[in-house]
C-alpha cells in the first residue's frame, strides 16, 4: 500500500518514515544555509513574512490538487496551533544566531532536539526506548558535543540559542506524535505558515513603531530591524526557501505521524552531515577534524538504529 504525503495517517511505516526524514533533513539543511548566506541583507521578520506568504500559497495549491481545501482544516485545532507556536519559538532562537555562528554550530545546537524527543517519548508518549536506541542517542549526543566544542575558548553564549531552539523543536515533534497524528500534513503546514505570517507582520509593525537604537540595529540587524530594503534577490531567496521549507516540513510531519518518535530521532542527526556538505558548497568552509569525527559518530548512531529496527521487524 502506498503512502500519500497529504492524506491522514492510518498505520506505522518505519522505513518510509525514515526516507522522509532523510529528504527533510537534506532540504532543510540547504534552506538554513541559504538563510545564513542572506542574513546580512534581510531580517528575521521580513524573511518570515515573505516565506510564509509563499508557504501559504503553495500549501493552498497543493490542497486544491490533492483532495480539496478540507485538507487545510485541522481536526484538533488547539494541538495544531500549539505545535505552530512551538515551531515559531524554535525558529526565532535558531535564526537569531545565524549571523554569528557557523552552519555546523547552528546545526549541532539545534540537533540536540532528538535527545529531548527520545528522552521524553517514554513518559509523554508511552513509546518503548530500548537499549540500542539509548546507545545510539548517547553516541549521537557525544558526536554533537564534538561539533559544538563547549570547552573551547571560542565557545560563545550565542551557541545556546540553537540549543534552546532544539528544545522547542522537540516540543513540536512530540505534539505532532501525541495529538496531531491524524492531521493532514498540509493542515500542519498551513497552520505553521499562518503563524509565521502573523509573527512576521507583528515584528515588522512593532519595530517600525518602536525601533531599536542604531547601536542595537548594527550589532543585531537580523532581529533588531523590521523591514530592510527589499530587493529582487531577497524576494527570490524567500520564494526558494519557501519551497524548501514546505517540502521539508511536510516530509518531517508525515514521518513522525507514521513511526515512533524515538526510532526516528537518531536518524534526524543526518541533518548535521548535510549541513556540513552545504557549508562546504556555499561557504567553502569544511568543519574541523574534530567536528568531522563527531559527524561520523552521528551517522553511526543513525545506522545502528536502522539496523536494529530491521532486525526486530523480521
Image: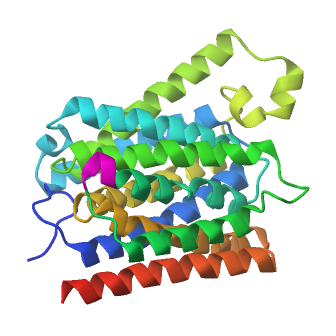
| Res 74 → quadrant | top left
The residue range painted magenta reads 122-126
Q: Nearer the viewer, residue 314 or 186?
A: 314
User: x and y percent of residue 165 in the render?
Assistant: 56, 44
Protein image colouring: rainbow
Residue 256 colored in magenta in the image: no
Relative to 254, 50 lies left or right: right
- Left or right, 176 with respect to 140, comes to left
- Report whether 220 appears left or right of 189: right
Q: Position of residue 12 (x, y in %)?
A: 17, 67
The residue positioned 64% from the left and 76% from the top of the image is 295
Q: Is residue 124 magenta?
A: yes
Identify the image quadrant of the N terminus: bottom left
Residue occupying image coordinates x 70% and y 50%: 38
Given residues 284 and 298, the one toward you in this image is 298
> Which residue is rendered at x = 27% and y = 78% of the image?
15
Quadrant housing residue 246: bottom left
Assign the C terminus to one quadrant of the image.
bottom left
Residue 286 in sight in this render? no
Overall secondary structure of the magenta section: helix
Q: Position of residue 45 (x, y in %)?
A: 60, 32
Residue 78 can be seen, yes or no? yes
Amino acid at each position: 500500500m502506498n503512502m500519500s504525503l497529504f492524506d491522514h495517517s492510518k498505520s506505522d511505516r518505519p522505513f518510509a518514515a525514515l526516507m522522509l526524514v532523510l529528504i527533510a533533513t537534506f532540504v532543510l539543511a540547504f534552506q538554513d544555509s541559504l538563510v545564513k548566506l542572506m542574513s546580512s541583507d534581510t531580517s528575521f521578520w521580513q524573511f518570515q513574512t515573505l516565506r510564509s506568504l509563499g508557504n501559504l500559497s503553495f500549501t493552498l495549491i497543493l490542497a486544491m490538487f490533492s483532495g480539496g481545501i478540507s485538507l487545510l482544516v485541522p481536526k484538533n485545532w488547539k494541538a495544531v496551533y500549539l505545535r505552530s507556536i512551538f515551531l515559531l519559538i524554535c525558529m526565532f532562537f535558531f535564526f537569531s544566531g545565524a549571523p554569528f555562528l557557523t552552519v555546523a554550530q547552528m546545526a549541532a545546537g539545534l540537533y540536540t532536539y532528538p535527545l529531548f524527543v527520545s528522552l521524553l517519548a517514554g513518559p509523554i508518549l508511552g513509546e518503548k526506548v530500548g537499549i540500542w536506541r539509548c546507545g545510539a542517542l548517547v553516541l549521537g549526543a557525544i558526536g554533537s558535543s564534538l561539533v559544538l566544542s563547549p570547552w573551547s575558548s571560542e565557545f560563545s553564549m550565542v551557541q545556546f540559542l540553537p540549543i534552546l531552539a532544539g528544545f522547542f523543536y522537540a516540543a513540536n515533534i512530540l505534539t505532532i506524535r501525541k495529538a496531531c497524528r491524524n492531521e493532514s500534513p498540509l493542515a500542519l503546514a498551513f497552520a505553521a505558515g499562518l503563524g509565521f505570517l502573523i509573527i512576521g507582520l507583528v515584528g515588522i509593525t512593532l519595530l517600525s513603531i518602536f525601533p531599536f537604537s542604531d547601536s542595537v540595529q548594527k550589532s543585531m540587524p537580523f532581529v533588531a530591524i523590521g523591514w530592510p530594503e527589499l530587493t529582487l534577490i531577497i524576494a527570490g531567496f524567500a520564494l526558494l526557501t519557501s519551497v524548501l521549507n514546505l517540502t521539508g516540513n511536510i516530509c518531517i510531519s508525515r514521518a513522525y505521524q507514521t513511526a515512533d518518535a524515538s526510532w526516528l530521532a537518531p536518524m534526524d542527526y543526518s541533518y548535521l552531515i548535510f549541513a556540513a556538505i552545504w557549508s562546504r558548497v556555499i561557504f567553502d568552509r569544511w568543519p574541523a577534524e574534530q567536528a568531522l569525527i563527531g559527524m561520523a559518530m552521528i551517522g553511526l548512531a543513525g545506522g545502528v538504529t536502522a539496523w536494529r529496527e530491521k532486525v526486530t521487524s523480521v
